[in-house]
Each structure stands twice: as C-alpha cells, then as structure tokens.
Image (cartoon, helix red, strand yellow):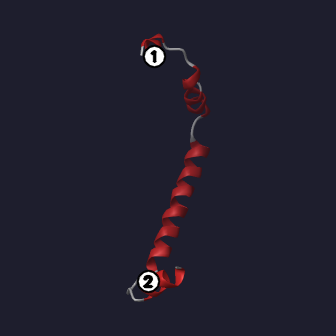
Amino acid sequence: MLKYIKGNLENIDGVEIYPIISLVIFFVFFVALFWWVFTTKKEHIQEVSNIPLENNPKDDIL
C-alpha cells in the first residue's frame, strides 16, 4: 500500500516541501502553547479550574 502512495507522490513536483511545512506548523504550535502556559497568570488558571465546581442555580433549572 505504501509503495503505491510513494510512487504517486514521486511524480508531483515540489512535494518535498509539504513535510517541512507540516513540521514547522507543528513546532510553532507547540512553542506557542508552551509560551502561553508559562506566561499565563496563576489567578486565571485557578479561576478557570474552579468553573466546574461552581454551583449555579441557573444551571440546575436546565
């Protein structure tokens, strides 16, 4: 199965750029995610983590 895919991809001009582009997108996404995690204020993380524990009477009606 892989040899058929590889054979088809060898006929496409410029196909070698797609793995490089996907690696760059992957790397940039996780670098941005790590940057966001380390720069987010602890108060915000605490507030967001307590959302499921809050008891809203408005939610009980639904």
At label 2, the amino acid type is Leu
At label 1, the amino acid type is Asp
Q: Quadrant of residue 15?
A: bottom left
x 54%, y 14%: residue: 55
The foreground one among 58 and 45 is 58
Q: Quadrant of residue 9?
A: bottom left
Q: Residues within 10 Å of mark 2 (few under 14, many from 20)?
A: few
x 42%, y 16%: residue: 62
Q: 9 above or below 52?
A: below
Give the SS element for disc 1: helix
Q: Residues within 10 Å of mark 1 (few under 14, many from 20)?
A: few
Q: 15 above or below 54?
A: below
Residue 22's disc is none
Q: Kindly check if marks 2 and 1 are in contact, taking CB atoms under 8 A apart as contact.
A: no
Cα distance in 3D space between marks 2 and 1? 53 Å
Give the SS element for disc 2: helix
The foreground one among 11 and 17 is 11
In the rendering, at what x and y percent does residue 18 appear?
A: 45, 75
Please state the total of marks drawn on the protein image. Answer: 2
**Residue 57 in the figure: left or right of residue 35:** left
In the rendering, at what x and y percent does residue 31 appear?
A: 56, 57
x 61%, y 45%: residue: 38
Residue furthest left as drawn: 13
**Residue labelled with disc 1:** 59
In the rendering, at what x and y percent does residue 34 appear?
A: 59, 51
**Residue labelled with disc 2:** 9
x 59%, y 29%: residue: 49
Q: 27 above or below 43?
A: below
Which sits earlier in the primary sequence, circle 2 or circle 1? 2
